[in-house]
Amino acid sequence: MVGSEVVAREVVVHGRVQGVFFRASCQREAQQRGLAGWVTNEPDGSVRAWFEGPHAEVGAICAWCRHGPVGALVERVSVVEREPGGLRGFVVR
């Protein structure tokens, strides 16, 4: 089934995304979806994340990143397909 195929996506979110609980909210969203990976703040003010898991769930969190939590102002999001690395758990870096 395509929806259960394990995929990985690297996502970079630009806008007002630091200082608005984006990372903590992203971690909660990822854990609720059973995804593995990480999320971190970047020096340029963006947030970078890596998601691994079922295709449908990774797609759903990529869509969530396009608006983020209350207080975020997402200007643009880039999503790049990556090879899954077999990560376990989801952490804030």
Image (spheres, helix red, strand yellow):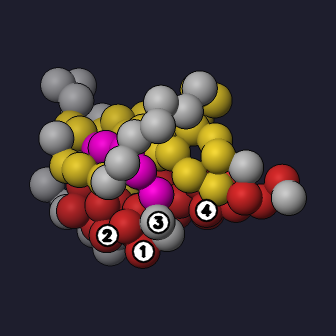
Crowd class of label 3 (few under 14; some 14 to 19; many from 20; radius 10 Å)? some
Q: Position of residue 11 (x, y in %)?
A: 48, 37
Secondary element type, mark 4: helix
| Disc 2 + disc 1, Cβ < 8 Å | yes
Q: Secondary structure at mark 3?
A: loop
Return the mark for residue 74: none
Q: Cα distance, mark 2 to mark 3?
A: 10 Å
Write down the residue under mark 2.
28
Residue 68: quarter of image: bottom left
Task: Decide whether the magenta segment is chiefly helix, strand or loop.
Answer: strand
Instruction: Give the magenta range.
Output: 35-39
Q: Amino acid at mark 4?
A: Glu
Q: Residue at x 46, y 37 (%)?
A: 86
Residue holding disc 3: 34
Q: Secondary structure at mark 1?
A: helix
How far, Cα to Cα, is label 1 from label 3?
6 Å
Residue ID at (37%, 67%): 31
**Which element carries disc 2, helix, strand or loop?**
helix
Quadrant including the C terminus: top left
In the rendered image, residue 71, in percent from the top left (x then y), is placed at: 28, 68
Tell me the residue that label 4 is attached to: 57
Report whether 86 appears left or right of 45. right
Q: Nearer the viewer, residue 74 or 22?
A: 22
Mark closest to the chain's N terminus, 4 or 1: 1
Q: Are marks 4 and 3 in contact (CB under 8 Å)?
A: yes
